Amino acid sequence: MLRQLDQRLTDYMLKTYEMPLTQLRGVHTDLADVPRSLPFRTFKNNENYVTQLHEIPTALAQTIEVLKQGEKDGLMPLRSLLEQVPEQCRGIAGEDPFDRRLRQQSHCNPGRTPFAFRHPGQSTQQRDRDCRRRAESPIS
């Protein structure tokens, strides 16, 4: 534990936090992990998820500001590593949470599928249309 604290202090002094993106981690992977960390057991869980989706632009803007500060301080990740990030993002973004095959595959892990639950009285088609509209609105 002491070693970890010492490492964190060193990282802070070196301002490594001003390089928040690598080809392996960053806001692009953190946001992709959000659905895996949330329980999708109730309609309210889905509503909370949609609320978090609407916060994505803020998270991206904050990351850009940190990157700009890192650039001013001369702290930049290697270009060859950052060039891998867009392709990784395309792979992450390529999965459609409304794809029925993905939902069926996720039934082995019940409660972990976004929008698996609907508001009482709402048909499956209505739910899918409504959820898709609300989920895609922050990024369209």
Image (cartoon, helix red, strand yellow):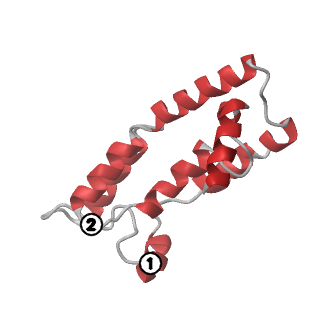
* Residue 118: percent from left, percent from top: 23, 63
What label does residue 117 carry, if any? 2
Q: Is residue 133 among the parts visible in the rendering?
A: no
In the picture as drawn, the residue positioned furthest to the left comes out as 121
Q: Residues within 10 Å of mark 1 (few under 14, many from 20)?
A: few
> Circle 2 — which element?
loop
Cα–Cα gap, marks 1 and 2? 14 Å
Total marks in image? 2
* Residue 85: percent from left, percent from top: 73, 45
Give the amino acid at mark 1.
Gln
Q: Earlier in the sequence, mark 1 or mark 2?
A: 1
In the picture as drawn, the residue positioned furthest to the front comes out as 2
Give the amino acid at mark 2.
Phe
In the picture as drawn, the residue positioned furthest to the bottom comes out as 108
Who's the residue at 33% across and 61% down the image? 115
Q: Which residue is mark 1?
A: 104
- Left/right of residue 53 with respect to residue 32 in the rendered view: left
> Circle 1 — which element?
helix
- Left/right of residue 75 with respect to residue 116 in the rendered view: right
Who's the residue at 23% across and 60% down the image? 43
